[in-house]
Amino acid sequence: MKAGIVGLPNVGKSTLFNCLSNAKAQSANFPFCTIEPNIGVVNVPDPRIARLEELVKPERVQMATVDIVDIAGLVKGASKGEGLGNQFLGNIRECNAIIHVLRCFDNDNIVHVDGNVNPIRDKETIDIELQLKDLETVEKRLEKTNRAAKTGNKEAQAEKALLDRIRETLLQGKSARTVVAQNQDEEALMEEFQLITLKPVLYVCNVDEASAVSGNQYVEQVRELVKDENAEVIVLSVGAEADITELESYEERQMFLQDLGLTEPGSAVLIRAAYKLLNLQTYFTAGVKEVRAWTIKIGDTAPKAAGVIHTDFEKGFIRAEVIAYEDFSNFGSEAKVKEAGKLRVEGKEYIVKDGDVMHFRFNV
């Protein structure tokens, strides 16, 4: 599962990517500095794993990770291949969610491709290019579906009705994610269409250092614009985040954050938000050999969660022993949780909850 960072050139995408992954993607003051998409495997900050490590004292600890992709800046006409449009749009299509970076700071030393700072216009530029590309995809699919629908094929007629609704939405300048599937068949079809504007989106307002805590007028404009999109808006000073990653010690980083008025780096907030955006959650295994966070989809059953460790665990699943994280933390050990009667035995239908501490019984 990958989240792709998109935006116009020079809005801070590559600098943000470097902060998130500590990979050193080239970062320069001109467009098309990032040509190949850089991929960073990023640890998901989670204070629960530190607490489990403190209690269990394992030999090693493994955190959950999320893949972040740095995609080069889109420009007007990308849907028609302008700039490096086709390649960029292909890279976005391969991601599962979009982190859309908007420039919300003034700085005469950093060139803006359109001459002045205007996050509303910038957002619309990107949206239009993505919508145009989806419109092209929908119209190509309609050509084929229309022929089958005319023969009386019921499935084709249902698909045509959905494609017509999506096409109308795109022509109105709205993204495909605003189209609500009316049943499970439509849900499955929408996934099959692989439309870019169906992907969930998170907006990152890149602000100056002084606006890192409470934002600014540009951020308010963005919030107002996206209020009907059911999308999260995160305020981040990418320049300050870059400075934080340069500091050697934890103490220095904490002092820097305090000076900014922050309790943790904005990048940590963003990584957790991206994880959630990808519909992911964490369960833990906790033993003396290893405390580990495992990544699963929200809604996964116990056998599916077991299969993330090894496919044999899923195939031969018998049951799961489950402790809620809060109980493990409060009682301090598995033995004390058992004494208190808080360990549960769950079967194949159990829907795993975020933070569950689990052991699996299986037979292959």
Image: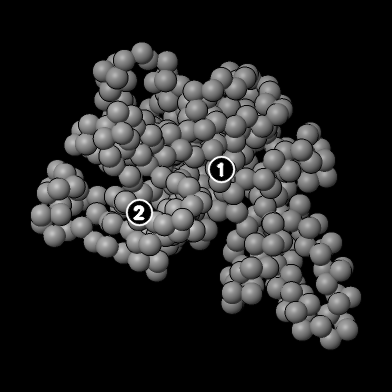
Q: Position of residue 344 (x, y in %)?
A: 24, 61
Mark 1, other Cα within 10 Å: few <14 / some 14–19 / many ≥20: many
Mark 2, other Cα within 10 Å: few <14 / some 14–19 / many ≥20: many
Residue linked to disc 2: 360
Q: Viewer-proximal residue, 150 or 106?
A: 150
Which residue is pictured at 48% across the width and 47% down the height?
310
Element type where label 2 sits in the image = strand
Point out the tag, 1 or 2, that comes first from the N-terminus.
1
354 to 349, vertically: above or below: above
The amino acid marked with disc number 2 is Phe
Which residue is pictured at 27% across the width and 62% down the height?
345
In the image: residue 303, left or right of residue 253: right
Q: Viewer-proximal residue, 112 or 186?
A: 186
38 to 362, vertically: above or below: above
Q: Viewer-proximal residue, 42 or 171?
A: 42
Residue linked to disc 1: 3
Element type where label 1 sits in the image = strand
39 to 352, vertically: above or below: above
Which residue is pictured at 42% across the width and 39% down the height?
64
How far, Cα to Cα, is label 1 from label 2?
A: 30 Å
Q: Splitting the image into 4 quarters, where does residue 164 fall?
A: bottom right
Q: Position of residue 187 (x, y in %)?
A: 61, 69
225 to 261, vertically: above or below: below
The amino acid marked with disc number 1 is Ala
Q: Splitting the image into 4 quarters, where does residue 51 fall?
A: top left
Q: Is residue 220 visible?
A: no
Q: Viewer-proximal residue, 334 or 79?
A: 334
Which is in the foreground here, disc 1 or disc 2?
A: 2
Q: Position of residue 259 (x, y in %)?
A: 28, 22
Q: Position of residue 207 (x, y in %)?
A: 46, 32
Picture mark count: 2
Farthest-out residue, bottom:
152
